[in-house]
Image (tube, grey):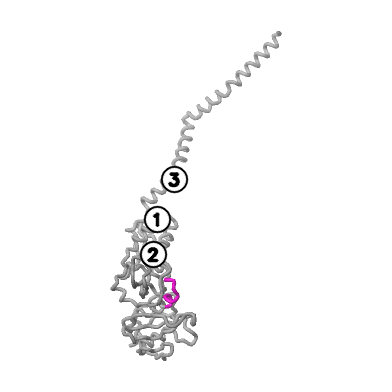
Amino acid sequence: MTESSQSKRTSSNRRRGSDAEAPPSKIRWIASLVAAPVILSILWPAILLVVGYAAWQSWGAHYVAHEYYGVNAEAINVTPLPDYVRTDIIRTVYNDAAMDKLSLMDKQACAKVASAFSSNAWVRRVVGVRKLAGGRLDVRLEYRQPVAMVHVISRHPDRNGAGFFAIDGEGVLLPDTDFSPSETLRYLHIIVPGAYPTGGVGSEFGDSRVQAAALLAHLLHPYREQLGITSIGVYGDLRQNPIVQLEIAGKEADERWFWGSPPGVEAQSEPPAMMKLQSLLNGAPPGSDLRQVQYTSAPIVQNHPVMQAPRIGTAPVGQPR
């Protein structure tokens, strides 16, 4: 073996040894960089920032929003309740809509609160919702007005005999738990054979005859005591006349007036509802057909509150002087 060949083999072995030692050297070099104070001052804060952000998104933001900006039932103010509403609307809506999980930091908080209150049977319309200082909410509501009691024969297995369902001027069912049996006498009775609600509280009664009578009850409600009217019934057969025809009755058996079509859907030759009402206020005798009684103009005064109902074209007037 020549000296030249031996030198080449020695050199080759050195290179292979150097290559074998390279990986451990690189690992040690990277470890030394990580352990260096300068790298730590940059790397560890970045790691903590990422971990902290993830933790905040997972539970921190929700905790703070709920703890410091959550909606409290005691901080909700609504339009004063009418005397006929005995339900604690704030507490009922708060529990039913799980508003304890809502945060005032939510951009849709006012819309969600409005939606929650609009689902209550006593609320006809949510006028507006405002956030106030101190985490308070001001909710402006328009309430439903009970105007009649629908007389029915109970179909409930636990209740036998006759009963009543309270409705407003749009024929929407109201919570019957807010009315005592004696209070049914304060409202007009709607008597429609076989009538029974098809929906629950907060929905329409579901009978076109009752819906028509509800419109008339809305108009007559402020004058019920003045006119001595106690009930509204249907007249004739719907198969012969597609428009429900109504009649009203007083305390005595012979006190009946034929009203005709519901307010707002009168026939072309039929007087409007306000003219019929004026005829009653002017003393139309029992047995009169209010579609035929001549209207006598007289000065009138609005001494009754005007009730709002989109299905009635005109508001009730007051009694003549």
The quarter of the image holding the N terminus is top right
Q: Separation of disc 3 and disc 1 at Cα?
A: 19 Å
Q: Nearer the viewer, residue 151 or 23?
A: 151
For residue 48, side relative to residue 6 (left or right): left
* Residue contact between numbered discs 2 and 3, judged by CB atoms under 8 Å: no
Q: Residues within 10 Å of mark 1 (few under 14, many from 20)?
A: some
The residue identified by callout 3 is 58
Q: Amino acid at mark 3?
A: Ser
Residue topped by disc 1: 104
Q: Tag 1 or tag 2, which sits nearer the N-term?
A: 1
The answer to whether 209 is drawn above or below residue 136 in the figure is below
Whether residue 80 is visible: no
How far apart are the two marked residues, 2 and 1, measured between alpha carbons?
Answer: 21 Å
Query: To which quarter of the image does residue 98 belong?
Result: bottom left
The kind of residue on which mark 2 rests is Asn
- x, y percent for residue 94: 36, 59
Q: Quadrant of residue 307?
A: bottom left
SS at mark 3 in the image: helix
Please report the bounds of the magenta region as a residue range. Answer: 205-212
Between residues 292 and 314, which one lies in front from this camera angle?
292
User: Where is residue 197 drawn, in percent x and y?
Assistant: 41, 70
Q: Quadrant of the C terminus?
A: bottom left
Looking at the picture, tell me which residue is in the foreground, 184 or 66: 184
Task: Examine the residues drawn in magenta and state their main secondary structure.
Answer: helix
In the rendering, which numbered label is found on residue 120? Answer: 2
Q: Which mark is residue 73?
A: none
Residue neighbourhood size for the residue with mark 2, other residues' Cα within 10 Å, grouped as few (<14), some (14–19), many (≥20): many
Q: Residue at x 39, y 60 (%)?
A: 131
Is residue 151 visible from the viewing direction of this image? yes
